Image (cartoon, rainbow, N blue to C red):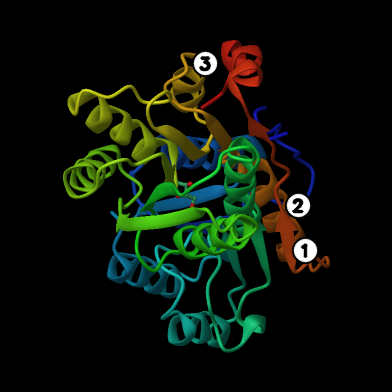
Amino acid sequence: CGGGEDAAPGGAGQDGVRLGFSQVGTESAWRLANTRSIEHAATNAGVRLDLRIADGKQENQAAAIREFISADVDVIAFSPVVETGWDTLLQEARDAGIPVIVTDRMVDTTDTSLFVTMLGSDFTAEGRKAGEWLVEHYRDRHGRVRIVEIEGTAGSAPANQRRAGFAEAIKADRDLQVIGSGDGDFTRAQGEQVMAGFLAAHTGIDAVFAHNDDEGLGAVEAIEAAGKRPGTDIKIITVDASRDGLAALAEGRLNYVVECNPLLGSQLMELVGKVTTGQTVPRRVVVDETAFDREAAKAVLHNRQY
Ligand code: AHR
């Protein structure tokens, strides 16, 4: 599974290649680990990395990508803040003859040949795993289960796809009902605020599905501030499996954590090497991932990389 650091492959033709990479921002522990992994793998592979952080703004990513095009880099890679609105930009890169690799979050384009490959997680499967845990957990309970959902950044692929996978899974039990949802923007502060709003608006919340660990840990704080016990009075399921998320799971303050692996650096450098040497690459590279309950979290926590 995805807990181990990526070893730099080397020897795949990346040495000296100029890669422009536009990163989403610094919103979560996952994101910081993803950036570190890419920087580390670029150094190991001899790739000349031009890294730009977009602070969660699509217009910043567009500006960075246009600068990469002007600089005539060998490859552009980016993790899109939101899914839509990329066609013109991708066409500009194609017109300039620069291949584009999409990482982490998918783009929604009219022409998928505008990028060479997509490397990242299956977010729908992650949402489904979260929903399946709830179905199983409440199997013997009769009566309504009130769920609130703290979603990721509005319009982003992980928010859209995790919501869809989760909804699909909980359909298996009609008692499982989402009574509220809000945008937690993948941050701890926003997760706390959204959860505080849910607690003020609803009584008898049974469970929270937070689209990442940071939001879930923010929800823990809001639940404690409301005098309830997170993980006991209100069940919490999150995605990422960061060190902080797994520690809270081991302590019983979270109940289930679905893994999303940020350590994509070496796989990205390998793709960069192949793309620049004319080798074929798969259209989609899916990252191998698992999920953790309390015991599983305790077993891996000591050597978690992010
Ligand atoms: O795109 C991956 C998501 O973005 C991670 O789940 C989240 O933590 C991050 O900010």
Q: Secondary structure at mark 3?
A: helix
Q: Is residue 185 left or right of residue 136?
A: left
Judge whether 91 appears above or below 241 on screen.
Answer: below
Query: Mark 1 is on which residue type?
Result: Thr
Q: Residue at the location (66% across, 20% down)? A: 296
Measure the alpha-carbon separation of dots 2 and 3. Answer: 42 Å
Q: Which mark is residue 277?
A: 1
Q: Is residue 116 left or right of residue 158?
A: right
Cβ–Cβ below 8 Å for labels 2 and 1?
Answer: yes
Most foreground residue, 33 or 198: 198
Most foreground residue, 294 or 118: 294
Q: Which mark is residue 250?
A: 3
Between label 2 and label 3, give the one nearer the viewer: 3
Query: Mark 2 is on which residue type?
Result: Gly
The residue carrying mark 2 is 13
Q: Is residue 302 left or right of residue 212?
A: right
